[in-house]
Every structure is written in C-alpha cells, then in structure tokens.
Amino acid sequence: MTDMMKDKVVVVTGSGGGIGREFALLMAAEGAKVVVNDIGASVSGEGKDAGPAQKVVDEIRAKGGQAVANTDSVATWMSANAIIKTAIDSFGRIDCVVNNAGILRDRMFFKMNPEEWSAVIDVHLNGTFYVSRAAATYFREQESGAYVHMTSTSGLIGNIGQANYGAAKLGITALSKMIAMDMARYKVRSNCIAPFAWSRMIGSIPADTPEAKARVEKLKTMEAAKIAPMAVFLCSDAAKDVSGQVFAVRANEIFLMSQPRPLRSVHRDGGWTAQSIAEHAIPAMKAGFYGLDRSQDVFSWDPV
C-alpha cells in the first residue's frame, strides 16, 4: 500500500458489509483511521445489530489498523451528528465522509406506499445531508475535507420499480454538486460514485424473469472491492483538484458521467403558443429525445 490516507480520519457509513466494508478496509490499509458506521439492519432497514460494524473494526485492528465502531442511524439529525462526534472523540478530527449507507424498498410506482417512499428517502438523501452537514462545521473550520457520496445509475439513467431509490440517488448528485460549490471556498471537495458491484442490497432485487436473472448473474461477477480504490483516491490529497464530479465504477472500468446541459434550443419571434410548440418546437427537438432506457440498456456490454 502507498499510505495515501496516512493519518486521515474517515467516516464510512453503512460499512458493516458489502461495498462499505471494502471502503473501510482499504481506507485503513492506506493509513486512515476509520469510523465504521453500520446499524446492522436488514436490506429494507429493519432491525439493529452491532455485530457487523464491530466485525469490520476487528478485521482492521487485526491487520494493525485503527478503527472504531458506530451504530447510529444516518436518518436523523441527532444520530448523524453522533456519527461525526465519534470521529472527533476517538481521533480528534474528521477529514473525509463516505456516504454509503442505504436500504431498498423496491416497488412499482403505482403500488408504492408513502412509508416505502419516505424510508428510502430518509436513509439515502436525508442521511447524506445530515451526515455531510454534521461534518461541514469541522471542514469549514479546518479549511479542508472531502465528501464521497454513493449515487446510482438507477437515478442517473433509470430503472423499473425503484422510484424511491432512483429519486434519492439523483437527488444525492445534485446535493453533492451544491456542496462542492458552497464549500469550495473552504477547500472542501464533494464527488459521487455510481458503483456496479454485487452486494447484499443488490442481491435483494427481484429476479423473476430470464432477463433479470441474467442481469443478476452479470452483477455477481462485479466485486465490491473494485469500487474501493476510487473512494480512497477521492478522499486523498491526490484528488485536491477533483470536485463536483460523478464517476461510475464497473469492475475494471471507470466512467466520468455526464451532467445535464442544454442539447438543443428553438426560438420563435413573439413567443410560443401550445399549437406552435406542437407543430414546430417538438418536431425540431424530437431527434434529441431520450428513450426510456434502463441502466442495463445503456451499460449493455459485459464488464471487463
């Protein structure tokens, strides 16, 4: 290892297993002091178990690293602040926050109930805000810091049966950009990763068609450990000039994702009527319309 994170203090939420665990392990291997946060809940966010977080801490310590466990939820303001306070109390500072905690409550939009919507928004979007905001006070005072947020192609591109999850993940990309802009004056960076990797959460997605089963088998070949180097890089001083970006990592591939910008415009002297929009504006722009593509339609080739 290269000690890219030597003496830095990192909070990784949802790091009791899956992708988050790989983040925590590699951060520690690169010299970071890690707060391993995980409430030990089910994929749907139910229950609580201190075991997963402590197990990762034990793994890190067994290899000579420094880590402490935290089992506070990201989904409330008070508990999110307690996560950051664990870093301050244990290691005296905070240098990077990796917002990885998440749950799934997949359901077709026309069947989704308010609780399924709110539960996912609370953990993903609100949780990302709460933990990030709690760290912002320290980042601002020390004029340094980095955020790495997990987004998803379910939000960036689209997926069926994930209105709550996709909305939360796309919201996180906007939040990350605003954080990057608001905190730039304090030398604080904010970036997103859309990970492709097999995990407990991905394993919970229904696979009741041949197409879905084939997609799951493809996902199983994508190791969570392949995502971790990008998170380490973005938290390190080597990424001092990288902020406001969205990356996707898929096995050995790294993508820089596009961000919404105007594609085409039309102009009409005197303004538009509904009829003239139908007759002229829409036909002029229709060639640039996006289809209802799902993530797997866009990333249609096998991972390399």
Image: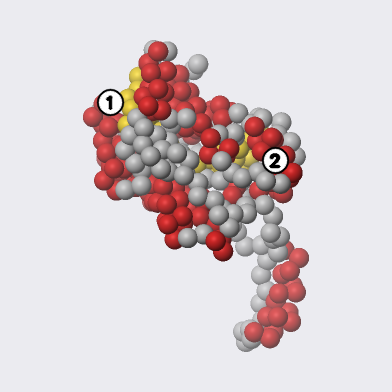
Q: Position of residue 239 (x, y in %)?
A: 49, 33
Q: Earlier in the sequence, mark 1 or mark 2?
A: 1
**Residue name at image x 53 percent, y 39 percent:** 201
Q: Does residue 94 appear left or right of residue 237 in this picture?
A: left
Residue for point 31% across, 48% down: 76
Q: Amino acid at mark 2?
A: Lys
Which numbered tag is attached to residue 213?
2
* Number of residues whose C-alpha sits closer than 10 Å to that of mark 2, classed few (under 14), some (14–19) or many (20 or more): few
Amino acid type, mark 1? Phe
Please, which residue is most extreme toward the left here?
A: 89
Q: Dot 2 lies on which element?
A: helix
Residue 91: mark in rendering: 1
- Whether label 1 touches label 2, CB < 8 Å: no
Tag 1, which secondary structure? Answer: helix
Is residue 88 found left or right of 191 in the rendered image? left
Q: Is residue 34 above or below residue 136?
A: above
Q: CA distance from mark 1 to mark 2?
A: 45 Å
**Residue 160's image quarter?**
bottom right
Crowding near the residue tagged with mark 1, few <14, some 14–19, many ≥20 C-alpha atoms within 10 Å: some
**Quarter residue 210 falls in:** top right
Q: Nearer the viewer, residue 291 or 218?
A: 218
- Residue at image position (41%, 43%) is 46
Position in image of residue 4 (x %, y %): 46, 23
